[in-house]
Image: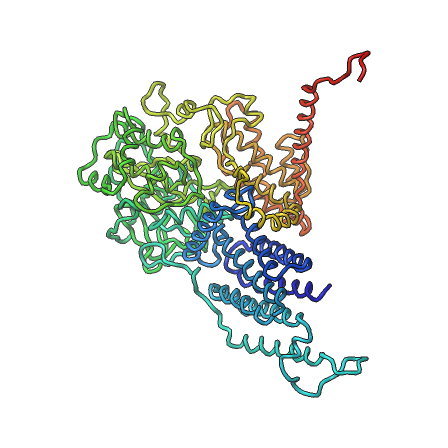
Amino acid sequence: MSGRARLALCAWAATMLASTALIPLVSPAIWIFQAGFMLAIQAGVGAATRRVPLARPLTVAAQALVTLLMLTLVFARAQAFAGIVPGPEAFQHFADLLQQGSDDVSRYAIPAPLHDGIRLMIIGGVLVIGLAVDTLAVTFRSAAPAGLPLLALYSVAAGLSNSGYDWLWFLFAAAGYLMLLLSEGRDRLAQWGRVFGGAPRTAPGSDSSGPLAPVRTGRRIGAVAVAIALLPLPTISGGLLDAAGTGVGAGTGGGGTISAVNPLVSLRDSLNVDENRQVLSLRTDSNDLSDMYLRIVSLDDFDGITWKPSQRHIEGVPDTFPTPTGLGADVKRSKITTRISAADWYAQDWLPMPYPPSGVNIDGSWRYEPVGMTVVGDHGQNTRGVTYTVTSLDVEPTAEQLATAPAPSKALETQYTKVPDSLPAVVAQTARRVTAGSANAYEQAVKLQDYFAVTGGFQYDTQVDVGTGRNAIAKFLKDKQGFCVHFSFAMAAMARTLGIPARVAVGFAPGTPEANQTVSVGLKDAHAWPELYFEGIGWTRFEPTPNRGSVPSYTQSTTPGSDIPDPAGSSAATSTAPSAAPSASESCTAQLKKIEGCESQAPALAAGDDGRGPWWYVRASLLGLGALLLLTVPFSPMLWRARTRSVRLGAHGRTAVDAALHTLAVWEELTDTAWDFGISPDDSLTPRKAAARIVRLGHLDPPTAASVHRVADAVEQVLYAPRPQPAAGLAQDVRRVVVGFQDTASRSTRLRAVVAPRSTVRVVWELSAWWASVTARAAAIRPTLRKPSGQQG
């Protein structure tokens, strides 16, 4: 290996060693492997251009270009030309991700979740530092100044970290820097100064004095410098990722908490986490888990820009809570008991409870807010690791009771129908248009719900910018893309313009049933929904967000000819053509179901550019593009597999057809996952026997085995039951199975499952079948070009 190549390798290693200081900041730390691979490509491009050789500035420019192309491929391929060449939309996406990452840094405690914004900041920062180190130490052959970017990388990490291992990360960074200095050559080290102690020594077999003494002197200097630096090294804590107050009271909040003061951003962050960390575990005697919403706080103060809780008096927690406001004696209700345990990292000021609560048994310093019927921590009390029992009411109003509800009191109506003058007129206009012909407030509410969830063409998308300002709701009504906060905020505002008292509730949608009869509630269950007030029933939940939660039974009509919209009927009235809308058509035939012709959940990737970009831009991109494509081809199976898993386990529509297609896709993902870990599929087995085979050969533990069998049972329901019952939480079950395989498989098996998954052979099969069909069609239409008999050519 040449000296320059050895120096480039040391520069890569030094950057990676310094980057380890960032490991405690986010979880999971898988980003470091991606950063290491991309940094190796960057260093390889530098080595190749130096070997040509190119001028030094051109070498740096080539490395910077390839770095930009790699970041575009990983973070903004949907906005780039041909998925790799960045344009204005890609740079705007980078800006949005960096803004999101900046918001995350100020919001989460260590370790923060690895959102795309934080991942871009970390990986992009490592690549920039790596480019600076390689440029200084290798391209310009000056290793000493390369310590400055390495020091900057370590300093940022140490300034944010609150771990007790900062000295270890410092050792790694210092060792990398010393290795870089020593690899620069003995001639460079000899210039550090006179030798400490003793006369110069000669190398064995040499007649003249050599550089061995200066080399040893350099090592001694490095060791002494590291030791001295370690002595005063403090254990740095705090920083930008420390817990920040996210609510009222004296609570300090923590990583992953949902801020009821500003749920717009916090809810999106929870929904977009890569790891669905468990927030709460509950055990309940309720017969209907689909209605087990856990409410944290209600937002009833709307200023045209955001919703927030009103400032109200709090008091001691009573033994028995009063009857909810507006609930009459003739409304059917039953009492349920729920025992809830919060994760030891989940620090929320408000107590998540089913609504309406009638009592809570909890230790600690808590206070009660009677209007919203919420419980809030006092003097720093929060939910971290607490276990408590809540008794609540399962209120079951009928559609008739809601339709015939009398007008609310004047004071309540005035307070909860207030909208600011700055609210765009299109909000009220759309509300009146959607609810035209309604006979009462209840029918208006149901039509609003169905407009967002079924008939309006809205799409559920957690990646949409949250939007700010007085035109945020109007923008959402125009773009028709958003997540639960957009839907709940818009429906509540529109209901108020119609004179219906409304507010927004923040909390968790129903979680996932577990094999031990508990329900697991994760970060991705974070949710917001509107509550509308009806005299005699009280505050009533509605669900306008497609693909989330459950539609309340009292909003679904079972009477033919009823004026109250039926979500199933509304869905059938929509277009039968494939659409990006979240609901599929009821007119889908059995043939289309078999070929998945009704599915429309997977968003399309960007189609690419039309090729009319400036020639100078194309010429400048060709070199880096070619090098990057050659280096990334071996990793295309890994990228394809990750995309396939995301599509299969993604959201689906509400109809029975959508649920069935989703179940089959989840089962295919489970079998492919087992295949990736060495368990080849056996199409001759029933789903039940196939599940037993996967559990046996995969040596899965009982909870993971239960997840496999739940998916198999759901598939058998779809395939054989006359009226299949959709199962919830199948995607979470498959993700649990993936973790189970990773826990039991060897390191080489895990590596192959990620880098070279066996199931990607399906691509080859599909291409082979496609090519066979193309050649068959071409042969069928090709004319016979044979000369007539007896003619001369």
Residue found at x 49% / y 57%: 111
Q: Nearer the viewer, residue 72 or 609?
A: 609
Picture coordinates of residue 128, whole percent (x, y): 54, 59
| Residue in the picture at 24% in, 30% down | 405
Q: Quadrant of the N terminus?
A: bottom right
Front residue of this view, candidates 649 and 116: 116
Q: Residue furthest bottom?
A: 198
Using residue 358 as the reference point, say whether residue 104 is left or right of it.
Answer: right
Q: Position of residue 246 (x, y in %)?
A: 36, 55
Position of 483 relative to 351 (above/below): above
Q: How many numbered dots are placed on residues in this image?
A: 0
Indicate the position of residue 8 as horizontal and vertical percent values.
Answer: 65, 63
> Which image quarter: residue 765?
top right
Task: Indicate the position of residue 110 as horizontal and vertical percent values.
Answer: 47, 59
Quarter of the view holding residue 230: bottom right
Scheme of image coloration = rainbow
User: Dividing the image into 4 quarters, which one contains the C terminus?
Assistant: top right
Where is 733 relative to 208, above or below?
above
For the point 45% across and 55% down, the residue is 345
Answer whether residue 41 is visible to the viewer in this image. yes
